[in-house]
Amino acid sequence: MVKRLEAVFLKAEHLSDRDQEALAGIIETEMIDDARWQARFEETSQTLTKIVERAKSHFRSGSCSEL
């Protein structure tokens, strides 16, 4: 564990049980949300790569116009 996180947890030990539960819920929610985003990006990475390659191809061929 990095020292900063360890220091934060040491401070959290002095919070009330209620506040510790709330903090744990926030951290857990963030971790779950991050995992979902990672999974979603992994699912779509091939599609995004294809879109980028197509856009580059259009740009190189001169078939793009300024927005």
Image (cartoon, grey):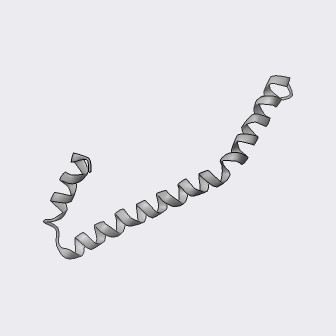
Q: In which quarter of the image is residue 24?
A: bottom left
Image coordinates of residue 57 in percent, x first then y, are 81, 29
Residue extending furthest bottom? 18
> Residue 23 vs residue 38: left or right?
left
Q: Is residue 63 above or below residue 4?
A: above
Q: Is any atom of residue 56 visible in this view? A: yes
Image coordinates of residue 42 in percent, x first then y, are 61, 51
Image coordinates of residue 38 in percent, x first then y, are 54, 54
Image coordinates of residue 11 in percent, x first then y, are 16, 58
Residue at image location 23% in from the left, 76% down from the top: 18
Residue at image location 70% in from the left, 41% down from the top: 49
Q: In this view, does 42 lie above or below 54?
A: below
Residue at image location 80% in from the left, 23% down from the top: 60
> Residue 17 vs residue 48: left or right?
left
Name the image quarter holding the C terminus.
top right
Residue at image location 46% in from the left, 64% down from the top: 32
